[in-house]
Image (spheres, helix red, strand yellow):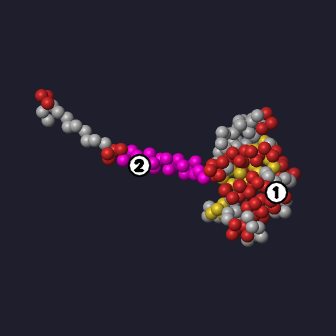
Amino acid sequence: MYAVVRVRGTVHIIPDIKKTLSLLSLNRCNHCTLVNETPQMKGMLRKAKDYITWGEVDAATLSKLLEYRARLVGDKKLVADDIKVIGFKSCEDLAGALVSGKLTFKDVTENLGVKHVLRLHPPARGYEGIKRAYRVGGALGYRGVDINKLLSRMLLADEKGDKSPAQGQKQDDRTSNAGAKKQSSTSPPKAPKTGKGGKE
């Protein structure tokens, strides 16, 4: 099973490639999806190779992806009770079945209502280079099992319990505004202006 990550935006993108990305459910940067290693799918990935990166995901990394980033309709997290509906005990068991080919991600999306896309954080330390192929030191195209290293960097904030960038930014804005109000309310009153001769 491949994990596929959107790396670049759509500025000046060819419409045909944009359609391919849409079929992959990769409409935004840092979005990830899971696909089977079929000839048809490999053709789609090669077509969009200048905007994505992909490789073989392992069970351990996939388990973390499902645990931290899989969402049901209504933006609800995937939990053990949901997984039991299709006969698995945990994210680890489900990941193992997906990687081994016993189950497809389409089965999971259709039977559990899991969204096709996994919204990830930007990777810690950033991408290697969004205009070059991975084989020449960039971030694009096929990277084999090294996709797991990239995904681990993108899951780092989740494992540490950090908020998503958007939520964190909103929190910072609220904190800054609250601090400004507090400073304003506690500032000492200005001295009255005086005219000539020191009289008010």
Residue 102: percent from left, percent from top:
84, 63
Q: Which residue is mark 1?
A: 99
Q: Nearer the viewer, residue 177 or 30?
A: 177
Asked whether, in this view, residue 131 is left or right of residue 101, the answer is left
From this viewpoint, which residue is outermost toward the top?
197
Q: Is residue 173 magenta?
A: yes
Measure the C-alpha gap from mark 2 to mark 1. 48 Å
**Residue 165 visible to an observer of this rendering:** yes
Q: Which residues are magenta?
A: 161-182
On screen, 198 above or below 175?
above
Asked which quadrant contains residue 53, the reply is top right
Q: Nearer the viewer, residue 53 or 154?
A: 154
Which is the main secondary structure of the residues drawn in magenta?
A: helix
Q: Residue at x 65, y 64 (%)?
A: 73
Point out the residue furthest to the right here: 39
Residue 10 seen: no
Q: Secondary structure at mark 1?
A: helix
> Which amino acid, by three-letter code, is at mark 2?
Ala
Residue 198 locus on image (x, y percent): 14, 30
> Label 1: few (<14), some or many (≥20) within 10 Å?
many
Q: Amino acid at mark 1?
A: Val
Q: Find disc 2 in the rendering and name its residue.
A: 178
Q: Is residue 19 above or below residue 137?
A: below
